[in-house]
Structure formats: structure tokens, C-alpha cells
Amino acid sequence: MRRFLILVLALTAAACRSSVPSETTGAVTVADLAASDGPDRQERLIAGATREGELTLYTSAQTADLGPVVEAYEKKYGIRATIWRAGSEAVLNRAIQEARAGRHTVDVVETNGPEMESLSREQILQAIKSPYHADLIEPAIRPHGEWTGSRLNVFVQAYNTKLVKKEELPNTWEDLADARWKGRLGIEAEDSDWLAGIFGAIGQERGDKVFREIVSTNGMSVRKGHTLLTQLVVSGEVPLALTVYNYKAEQFRREGAPIDWFTIGSAIARPNGVGVAKNAPHPHAAVLYYDFELSPEGQAIIAEREFVPTSRKIDTPLNKVPMMFVDARVSIDEYDKWKNLYYDLFGAGR
């Protein structure tokens, strides 16, 4: 009888142990790791990621831009990463569709702020507690913690240095209403979040008046795609563009292209970010990558690609430029308002 009771107790204890997540059985989830902040955190993540051996990342960043960060992660930890790249809307739609279908493929998503915020609202992302959050600028940290700004898309003005003299660059938006800019201006087709930031900086009444005056006096070439618009500045087809991403202008400039950038007033910035899927199939590798991209090592690689990292430990030329930040929630909740006004002012989307 006593032997029977011992056997029953042993089996019961074993059953209880099997119901608790164990890193050796592979039952650990992202939620189990999310709040981990003990002294062995890094050691546990590396050990678990090594067992998992792989990572799947969805991103809208150009391979040449995010690729070096991923390659450094692979080299450092011996994890094989699979990258699926598409436009930010496609990244958002695929992640949502897979989650709703119960197909848990993605570990980490890295894309534009509004799309990251949408994934949070769909309850696809897991809040992570990272030791590197303390290094980041305030706008990079979301209240819910389900994604974090890892780099900034900074809207700047760019010009062809062969066609526009530095001394004739405008100091105010009103300067662009001068007739000498007739037929020389361009803008990207869908930058309504930039407009929201500009109006927040200069006021809606002034903004509405000045941009209507600019367009009526000098016209506006509307082009879809920031890379295309930057290329048109380089070619001279658009001598001065209003909404170029600083990193792309800087990349071309460093390659010797006739382009430079400047800002009229405060630069408008939007955090783009990284987040870990709640049902990531490789939770240790996912959290380890999240930490790596936000670490000084990962942020330095981002800066080398001329992006603006969100870590205060990394210095860039734009650290000295005043910025106005556009909240991703505004980009979503007030999207129709700013899209319609943008189309009305610039004739975009028609």
C-alpha cells in the first residue's frame, strides 16, 4: 500500500511539473520571457535561441538597410534568420491574416509606426521588458509597450545641388510661394502624417493658407514613393522636394550624387519600430533579436545606414536638428482627416 501511495505521489508531481512551462521541453512562450529581467536573462535567451536555431522576421525596410542588423545578429548568436520583405501595408495584412487563421509563423515584425500600432490593436504583439528601453528617447516608448521605436523616419527637404544654390534655399514655408520656384517643387503622394506634423508645428490656419498659395503659384509635382522622389531630385526632374526621408537623401549624397537636404523649421519625425509576436514560434530568438536591435550594437549599425536610431547613446547629425514627432495613434485615428486635406491641398491621389 505504501509503495502504491509513493507511486501515485510521484506521478502526480511529475504531472504538475509537466504543466509548468519548461525551457528544456520547449514549452516556454513569449509571455513567459516578456517580463524577465533577472541577472540570467541574457544567458537564458541565448541558450533558448540556440536550441530554437532560427528566427522569422517580417519587415518593410530595404534589405540593404535592415540586412546588416540581421546579419550581425546571426553572426553573433549563430541563429539563422529568414526575412520576408514587403510594403508596410502588406506586412500588416499578412501578420493579421496569419494570426486570425491560427498560423503562427512570424517571430518579429519591423515596420512603420502606424502599422505597428495597428498590430498592437489587433492584439498580435507582446509587451516586452528590455534593459535597453532606458537608453531610448521618450517618443520611442509606447504606453502599452507592445512595440518600440527603433529608428526614425525623418521628413526633410532635399534639393539638387546643381540646380538650386544653397543661398537661395527657403527659410520659411512662405518663401516657397515665390515665383522663382514655379515648376521646381515636388512632394510624395501619401505623406498625410507629415502634413499633420507640419500643421501641429505652424498651426492649421497658417498651414492651409501657405500651402494653397504655394500650389496655386508654383504647382506641385506629386510622385508616389520616397525613393522615387529622391531619385528625381538627383536626376534634376524635381529640383526641390518637400518630403524626402533623410536617410535616403544622405545615402545618395555620400555616393556622390548632386543632392543635399535641409529643414524648414522643425523636421517632422515618425518612429518606426520593432515588436515580438505573442505566438512567436521561436520565443527566445525573437526576444533576443528585439534586444539586439535596440542595443547600442544594433543601433550603431542602423546609424551606419544613415537612419536615425532612437538610442541616446548613438550620435547622428540629426540629433542637433529640432524635431516634431507624429504619434502613430494620430496617423491611424485621424487618417481620413489628414488624407483628405492632403489630397485637397496637393491634388494627390487623383
Image (cartoon, rainbow, N blue to C red):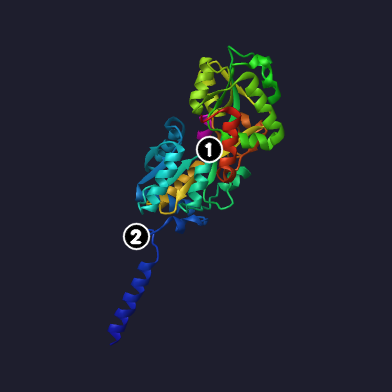
**The N terminus sits in image quarter:** bottom left
Question: Which residue is at 44% across, 30% downward?
Answer: 64
Q: Is label 1 in a helix, a strand or a loop?
A: helix
| Residue 239 placement: quadrant | top right
**Does the magenta stretch mainly form a helix, a strand or a loop?**
helix
C-beta proximity under 8 Å, tags 1 and 2: no
Residue 25 marker: 2
The correct choice, above or below, for 335 with respect to 342 in the image is: below
Looking at the image, tell me whether mark 1 or mark 2 is earlier in sequence order: 2
Q: Residues within 10 Å of mark 2 (few under 14, many from 20)?
A: few
x, y percent for residue 336: 56, 41
Name the amino acid, label 1. Gln
Extreme-top residue of the structure: 162
| Residue 327 placement: quadrant | top right
Residue sitting nearer the eye, 149 or 242: 242
Name the amino acid, label 2. Thr
Which stretch is magenta?
301-305
Would you name the residue on which mark 1 appears?
A: 299
Residue 281 is left or right of residue 39, and the answer is left
Q: Residues within 10 Å of mark 1 (few under 14, many from 20)?
A: many
x, y percent for residue 324: 65, 37
